[in-house]
Amino acid sequence: MKKLIGIDLGGTTVKFAILTETGEIEHKWSIQTDINQDGKKIVPDIIESINHRLDLYGLTADNFLGIGMGSPGSVDIKQGTVIGAYNLNWRTLQPVKEQVEKGVGIPFCIDNDANVAALGEQWKGAGEGSCNVVFVTLGTGVGGGIVAEGRLIHGVGAAGEIGHITVDPTGYECTCGNIGCLETVASATGVVRLARDLSEDFTGDSKLKWLIDDGQEVTAKTIFNQAKIDDPLAEIVVEKFYFYLGLACSNIANVLHPETIVIGGGVSAAGEMLVTGVNKYFNKYAFPTIKNSSKLKLAQLGNDAGVIGAASLVKNQ
């Protein structure tokens, strides 16, 4: 049976895994992402690392069905190129597929990192066994990927931009230039922004308010932890967060009717309280048939979602 290689390319590290065709990880490792010199060393470093590991494990190109990779930025899946991955300093077109196939001698395919994570959760994670899964990742921004009838949805190229669903037309300006995007209130930075704004008018006793007023560092984790111990300001903040995310998820479900909406990313570390809170508003706004059959779940694969999903690109193609 042939093996697969999955690569999760990030701004800090590149994660690799060698997997079986059934998605079981046999080996995994990582290297630092060198974004200096406009990211020119990133792909050569990836090639060098793969070749080194093949030698180390006594493997050759003939042992592999293919390599899949998830990358930030705008990905052309047909040409295998990336542009606009600014956290990699990739401002010009990068011929990733051409370089990797030439350097390693194994067929290569690539997709957007959020799409790839969606595939990972759909194949081996919280959406396992379902052909209809939406993945929402809550991190520095809000991203997502859509698997419908077992296939990733790309549209004309940018399908799955869940972070830019409008949830408050009178809300904050987004980095995309629009107003009130989900990303402005449900990302890690968005939750903190909500807390700072709501604290201005809050007059009760709150540790969270004291931390903000005292200039202490406040993160999304701080806010959710305070909500767990009944901090009144934190409870107000997370309730707003639940509303915005629940509204967005209901709109997604009303259009796509997935079996599972998987919530991942750093903010999802809040755990089951997040699913319970978001479900309240999801059930309020979702079409009755849909709310009784679409389920919200926490992501299960953690840091492995990217490499597992990337490997599944090979099987899908």
Image (cartoon, grey):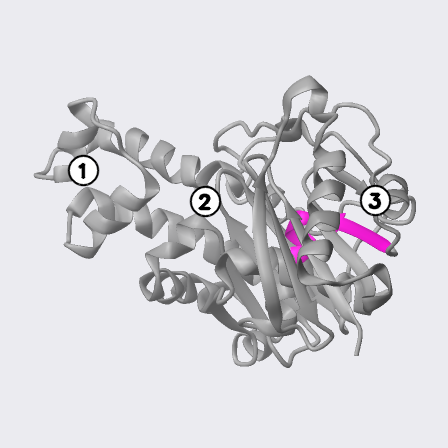
Report the quarter where the C terminus lies.
bottom right
Whether residue 251 appears in this view of the structure is no
Check disc 1 and report the residue beneath it. 208
Check disc 2 and report the residue beneath it. 186
Label 1 neighbourhood size at 10 Å, few (<14), some (14-19), many (20+)? Answer: many
Whether residue 132 sits left or right of residue 135 in the image: it is right
User: Measured from the top left, where is residue 115 in percent x and y?
Assistant: 69, 54
Q: CA distance from mark 2 to mark 1?
A: 18 Å
Label 2 neighbourhood size at 10 Å, few (<14), some (14-19), many (20+)? Answer: many
The part of the chain drawn in magenta is 108-116
Residue visible at 47% across and 53% down? 245
Is residue 51 or residue 169 the one in the foreground? 51
Quarter of the image where one finds residue 135: bottom right
Residue visible at 23% across and 45% down? 234
Task: Give the amino acid type for the residue marked by disc 3 in the picture.
Answer: Val
Dot 3 lies on which element?
helix
Check disc 3 and report the residue beneath it. 100
The correct choice, above or below, for 197 with respect to 188 in the image is: above
The correct choice, above or below, for 310 with respect to 82 in the image is: below
Q: Earlier in the sequence, mark 1 or mark 3?
A: 3
Q: Earlier in the sequence, mark 2 or mark 1?
A: 2
Whether residue 281 sits left or right of residue 78 in the image: it is left
Residue 261 lies within the magenta run = no
Dot 2 lies on which element?
helix
Task: Give the amino acid type for the residue marked by disc 1 in the picture.
Answer: Leu
Residue most extreme to the left: 205
Whether residue 59 sits left or right of residue 126 in the image: it is right
Is residue 38 or residue 221 the one in the foreground? 38
Q: CA distance from mark 1 to mark 3?
A: 49 Å
